[in-house]
Image (cartoon, helix red, strand yellow):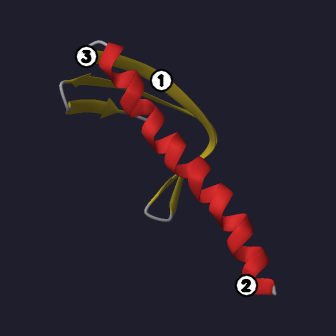
Amino acid sequence: MGEIMTFKRALPCSALLILALLCPLAIAEDSPSWSLSVYTDMVSKYLWRGWNLHDGLAMQPGAEYAIEGFTAGIWAT
């Protein structure tokens, strides 16, 4: 009985996941062939390979440029 209930729950969740993955494909036809994203993250501690390099607020800016399936990005701290 538990297996049937699990299947009944998994089927709608699987259908929603498939729809969520296919929606960007339908939208992509109208989108431009390039995009630019600029962002920044604020973190409370900066760790590098397990070493604590900075206690306190740290800003991590970045940018990404994408054109026709190719993406280039830059990130700093």
Q: Residues within 10 Å of mark 1 (few under 14, many from 20)?
A: few
Which image quarter holds the N terminus? bottom right
Which of the 4 quarters of the picture holds residue 63?
A: top left
Q: Under tag 3, what secondary structure?
A: strand
Kindly identify which residue carries mark 3. Answer: 34
Q: Nearer the viewer, mark 2 or mark 3?
A: 2
Of labels 2 and 1, earlier in sequence is 2
Q: Under tag 2, what secondary structure?
A: helix
Question: In the displayed structure, does residue 33 sit left or right of residue 42?
Answer: left
Which image quarter holds the C terminus? top left
Question: In the displayed structure, does residue 71 sit left or right of residue 37?
Answer: left
Kindly identify which residue carries mark 1. Answer: 39
* Residue at 73% over, 84% down: 3
Q: Which mark is on residue 3? A: 2
Along the viewing direction, whichever of 45 and 62 lies nearer the viewer: 62
Q: Residues within 10 Å of mark 2 (few under 14, many from 20)?
A: few
Can residue 37 be seen? yes
* Residue kind at label 3, given as amino acid type: Trp
* Residue kind at label 2, given as amino acid type: Glu
Q: From the viewer's perspective, is residue 25 above or below residue 13?
A: above
Q: Residues within 10 Å of mark 3 (few under 14, many from 20)?
A: few
Q: Residue 74: where, in percent of width, then height?
A: 30, 31
* Residue kind at label 1, given as amino acid type: Tyr
Along the viewing direction, whichever of 33 and 77 lies nearer the viewer: 33
C-alpha gap between disc 3 and disc 1: 17 Å
Q: From the viewer's perspective, is residue 4 above or below residue 35?
A: below
Q: Residue 48: where, in percent of width, then height?
A: 45, 56
